[in-house]
Image: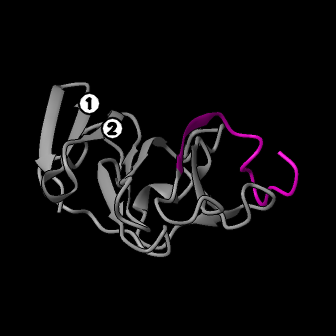
Amino acid sequence: MPGAESNAGTGRLQALAVDADNPAIVLLSTTYGVFRSEDSGVTWALLDSGLENTAVDTTPSGTRLTSALVSDPDRAGMFWVGTGYDKLKGVGLFRTRDSGATWRKPITGLEGKSINALALGGPANGRTLYIATDDGIWSLTAP
């Protein structure tokens, strides 16, 4: 991937999401963490403020455990990321409202659960986030 910072282009690409209002802002989930481009993919920067999972794990591969990513089509800057495998620290669900500058855990109950896929559906004023884990499907009314 031309212009990639750190390991954005060398890890396994997991998911890609585009900002609702600004298509030049793209988030990329990889096995080396979550990256953001503000110039339609020309350059990339690692996002790690609030994402516990972006600390390199202790395996020889150094993977960073991000696994699923989705954007809200009606809310600029709103993205959700699911993380990892196994019961490692930081595995769970995270949300950003500022295009990845900061991340927070929006709910409790998903800590330690590997997030395999995310989907967002429903009208803008009543979205549901669907979360696929090894334990089954979860749903959350998206704030």
Of residues 98 and 135, the one drawn nearer to the viewer in this rendering: 98
User: Taking 139 as reference, is 94 above or below it?
Assistant: below
* Residue displayed at 36% across by 54% down: 72
Q: Is residue 22 magenta?
A: no
Which residue in the rendered view is the most extreme toward the right? Answer: 2
- Mark 2 burial class by Cα count in 10 Å: few <14, some 14-19, many 20+: many
In the rendering, at what x and y percent does residue 65 appear? 49, 43
Q: Position of residue 37 (x, y in %)?
A: 67, 62
Q: Is residue 52 found left or right of 30 in the rendered image?
A: left
SS at badge 2: strand
Quadrant assignment for the N terminus: top right
Q: Where in the figure is residue 126, as x and y percent of width and height?
A: 12, 53
Q: Circle 2 is placed at which residue position? A: 118
Q: Classify residue 107 by image quadrant.
A: bottom left
- Under mark 1, the amino acid is Ala
Part of the protein shown in magenta: 1-17
- The residue located at (76%, 58%) in the rendering is 6
Asked whether the viewer can see residue 53, the reply is yes
Place of residue 89 in the rendered image (x, y in percent of width and height, measured from the top left): 34, 53
The answer to whether residue 34 of the structure is visible from this angle is no
Q: Residues within 10 Å of mark 1 (few under 14, many from 20)?
A: some
**Given the image, on which type of amino acid does mark 2 rest?**
Leu
Q: In the rendered structure, are the residues bearing label 1 and label 2 in contact, judged by CB atoms less than 8 Å apart?
A: yes
Tell how many labels.
2
Residue occupying image coordinates x 60% and y 56%: 26
Say which label, 1 or 2, has the lower sequence index: 2
- The numbered dot on residue 5 is none
Residue highlighted by disc 1: 132
Judged from the image, the secondary structure of the residue bearing numbered disc 1 is: strand
What main secondary structure does the magenta stretch of the protein show? Answer: loop
